[in-house]
Image (cartoon, rainbow, N blue to C red):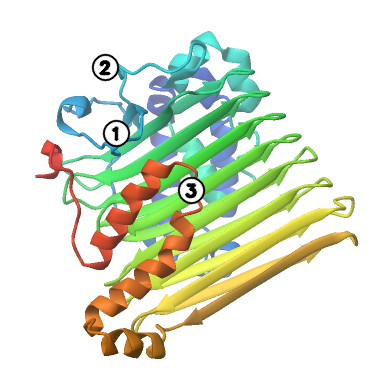
Amino acid sequence: MQSEKQYIDLYNEAQEMIKQHSCAVLNKVRDKAFEDFKAQGFPTKKVERYKYTDIPKLFAPDYGLNLQRLETPINPYDSFKCDVPNLSTSLYFVVNDQFYNKQLPKAQLNEGIVIDSICNAAKIYPELLEQHYARIADTSKDALTAFNTMLAQDGLFIYVPKGIKADRTIQVINILRSNVNLMVNRRVLIIIEEGAEASMLFCDDSTDDRNFLTTQVIEAYVADNAKLELNCLEETHLKNVRVSNVYIEQQKNSRVSHNIITLHNGVTRNKLDLTFRGEGSECFLNGCVIADKHQHVDNNTVINHAVSNCSSNQLYKYVLDDHAVGAFAGLIYVAKDAQKTLSHEVNQNICAASTAHMYTQPMLEIYADDVQCNHGSTIGQLNDAALFYMQQRGIDKREAKLLLEFAFINEVIDKMELIPLRDRLHHLVEKRFRGELEKCGSCKLCR
């Protein structure tokens, strides 16, 4: 319990300060989250869903926390231009764990859509926030969710009212910036009401050569006949640790597409829990990982088919080199009454070096008898025959290797609905395989 003790002591000593710099909707569940965290402690590798990542080790170092909510001296709109060519976005920033609202994007979204900090939104929509915040992110079932809930002091609120279809993609840049080693606890609440539609792009970037530890909890509620496309791109650095838990709840005839891309990182642990609560819904979960050196990427998913006539599709691909470690565990759970379920889960992996390691565990747990479910995984190396064939036609071995890796990953990228984002990712992935850090020329922070 050594890793937990410093945070238990911290909360006991600083809980009044934490609450003072937060708001009622977050504080209402904070003490329960603390008790849940104390009872569980950080999950060890003996906990099934965490067996591929040493969580207590990640939280053992002493990180600073900005509990007094001091402002970070930065205007991201002046210094950070993360544009996707030909993609019309409305651009917002979260600096560490604070929503930047001193300046808002000139390109406004449809009337009625709200993007603000959770604490600001709670003043206008108190009942909406209380109804949704920390409901599907159950602190009694996951210690890291409890940890985030007990320490998060604000967050990002995205609300798309009934029948509204966002014309622009909502782009959120999460910037890590600090002069000291820092822990950041981000919170995101997304509510897509009946018949509404929205596409979102979350980009994680770090600007300082410091040790960062980020915990993140995203709750997304997708109502009847609603549609959400959620794209998450991580481009941080080797000193960054990122632990993210995403919870999605879908109602009748809704559609969700979740795409997660890890291009640059240190240690990343992503957990995704998606539950079908209404019939006729479908989801598409795609992920790709490119890792080398000593990078570690662990993706863990659970899709809960709680009702009938829903379909889920998963495709995760990894390319690992050097001493990188990858892990994928995906459970498809089909409840007793969830007849007519369709589910397809695939995890494919390439270890480009004998020193790279990949762990894969696709799983099915089915209690209904009228279903179509399948799953599979592969771990291999690049095709020697294909490499030889390309070399015979004048392509050197290194270039041939890059082309094969690029083609392997492209299957995931091509499933994204935003064509300009696909094009941008094709470019970034090629740069990544060539060992280049792609930085936008207009980003003052990246120079």
Q: Is residue 52 above or below residue 238?
A: below
Q: Residue at x 31, y 29 (%)?
A: 93
Task: Give percent across and percent down for residue 417.
Answer: 50, 43
Residue neighbourhood size for the residue with mark 2, other residues' Cα within 10 Å, grouped as few (<14), some (14–19), many (≥20) = few
Label 1 SS: loop
Say which label, 2 or 1, has the lower sequence index.
1
Q: Which residue is mark 2?
A: 103
Give the mark nearest the N terminus, 2 or 3: 2
User: Image check: 438 left or right of 127?
Assistant: left
Q: Amino acid at mark 3?
A: Met
Q: Which mark is residue 416?
A: 3
- Using the numbered discs, state the Cα–Cα distance from disc 3 to disc 1 in whole angstroms: 36 Å
Mark 2 vs mark 3, CA separation in Å = 30 Å
Q: Nearer the viewer, mark 2 or mark 3?
A: 3
Q: Amino acid at mark 1?
A: Asn
Q: Residue at x 38, y 57 (%)?
A: 262
Picture quarter with the C terminus: top left
Residue 234 is situated, as x and y percent measured from the top left of the image, at: 35, 50
Q: Which residue is mark 1?
A: 66
Q: Position of residue 23 (x, y in %)?
A: 47, 19
Q: Quadrant of residue 115?
A: top left
134 in relation to 167, above or below: below
